[in-house]
Image: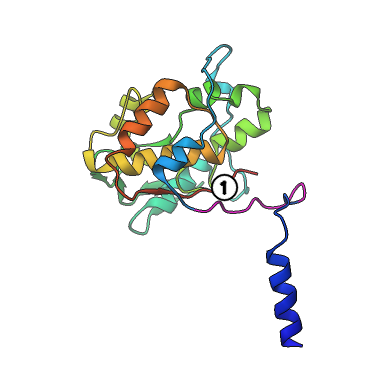
Amino acid sequence: MISTIAATAAALLTLPFTAAPAGAHPAQAEPLPLTAAIAQLPSAAESRDGYQRTSFKHWIDADRDACNTRAEVLISESRTEPVIEAGCKVTAGEWYSYYDGVTLTAPGGLDIDHMVPLAEAWDSGASAWTAARREAYANDLDAERSLVAVSARTNRAKADRDPADWTPPLADARCTYTADWVATKLRWQLAADDRERAALTELASGCGQESVDYQPAP
């Protein structure tokens, strides 16, 4: 019986890959070297025509637990037990802003950054999405790379710029940032234009064995 099961399993492994049925949970992609991951980004020119920040509804309380997306990220990323008051108001904790290496204890000094800014996502393909998919993107709590608590100062310096025009001021953060950016774009199948791809490739050249892992968005 055991040999029969083993033979059946071996036979299954030789079958060609087929896509999962519609509605199935997307499979985890295998980790890729950073340069290989950049090569997998779709290529397209960018256009901001028609963009409005309100096209991406956020911050929402998707699971109806009284904590909106911003609060969920603050709670998840605090290095100490956060202080949470009525209405899921986070009032204290300890957060490390990896863009600039700053530690903060007051949430008012933090922004929740969309790794790939909403405007950049629009430019790169989200303009063709449904409103529901844009909402899912703007509140993506299912991937650690998608949303990150950082100092308000660095988030506002970054604004809606891609790595061709902005990288973290902390040099040691740039390889992580590049991998996070690429992972987010691959997760949501967002394109890169020529300047962005060139900047990512240059950054990756100094990142040694940095790898990218991501799970395609539903």
Q: Looking at the image, is 193 positioned above or below residue 16?
A: above
Residue 87 placed where, x, y %? 51, 46
In depth, the one of 208 and 127 nearer the eye is 208
- Residue 215 placement, left or right of 31: right
Report the residue at 59% width, 51% height from top.
65
Which quarter shows the N terminus?
bottom right
In depth, the one of 158 and 109 nearer the eye is 158
Residue 184 placed where, x, y %? 49, 39
Residue 62 placed where, x, y %? 62, 44
Is 26 part of what is drawn in magenta? yes
Q: Which residues are magenta?
A: 21-30
- Residue 69 placement, left or right of 167: right
Packing grade of label 1 (10 A; few <14, some 14-19, many >=20) is some
Residue 145 placed where, x, y %? 45, 44
Secondary element under disc 1, as helix, strand or loop, is loop
Which quarter shows the C terminus?
top right
In depth, the one of 170 and 110 nearer the eye is 170
Q: Looking at the image, is 12 positioned above or below residue 18?
A: below
Report the residue at 62% width, 49% height from top.
63
User: For mark 1, what is the residue?
Assistant: 66
Main SS category, magenta section: loop
Report the residue at 36% width, 53% height from top.
78
Is residue 19 something one can see in this rendering?
A: yes
